Amino acid sequence: MPTNAKRHARTAASNGRHAARTVSRDAANAGREVLEGVREQVYDVMESGRSQIDDMAESARDSIRSNPFQAIAIAAGVGFFFALIMRIMRRLS
């Protein structure tokens, strides 16, 4: 291979390696940016859900405090309902 052709081949190989490193670095940076965006969105959704659960729990507490007998009756009804379902499930199995 003539010297000039070798030089061109080395230059092309060097340019290819440099381009590959650049593309790899750019892809990694883009991936990090996407991951950070997704992480922030997940955090926001979690915080929103946590806030909604806290609001619902506070509302339930207030409702129980203002209507304790109704809360007891509802709890007893739910317990009876689940006991009935469990009894039926045991008979079927």
Image (cartoon, helix red, strand yellow):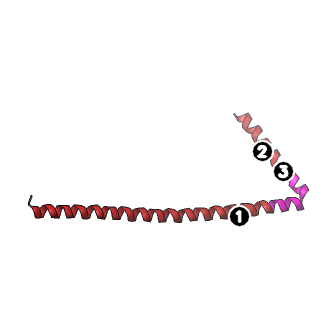
Secondary structure of residue under mark 2:
helix
Image side of residue 88 versus residue 43, left or right: right
State if disc 1 and disc 2 touch (CB < 8 Å).
no
Which amino acid, by three-letter code, is at mark 3?
A: Ala
Residue in the picture at 20% in, 64% down: 11
| 72, 8: nearer the viewer | 8
Q: Secondary structure at mark 3?
A: helix
Position of residue 67 measured from the top left corner of the image (x, y, whole percent): 89, 60
Marks 2,3: beta carbons within 8 A: no
Label 3 packing within 10 angstroms: few (<14), some (14-19), many (20+):
few
Q: Which numbered mark, 1 or 3, is in the foreground of this view? A: 1
Label 1, residues with CA under 10 Å away: few <14, some 14-19, many ≥20: few
**Image point 86% across, 55% down: which residue?**
71
Amino acid marked by disc 1: Ser
Residue that numbered label 1 is attached to:
51
Q: Is 62 included in the stretch rendered in magenta?
A: yes
Q: 10 Å neighbourhood of mark 2: few (<14), some, or many (≥20)?
A: few
Which residues fall within the magenta stretch? 59-73
Numbered disc in front, either 2 or 3: 3
Q: Count how many numbered circles sit on residues in the image.
A: 3
The residue closer to the viewer here, 84 or 37, is: 37
Q: Main secondary structure of the magenta part?
A: helix
Q: Earlier in the sequence, mark 2 or mark 1?
A: 1
The location of residue 92, given as percent across then percent down, is: 71, 35
Residue at 47% from the left image edge and 63% from the top image edge: 32
- Disc 3 target residue: 75
Alpha-carbon span between mark 2 and mark 3: 11 Å
The residue indicated by pointer 2 is 82
Nearer to the camera, 66 or 77: 66
Q: Earlier in the sequence, mark 1 or mark 3?
A: 1
* Disc 1 from disc 3: Cα separation: 25 Å
Disc number for residue 40: none
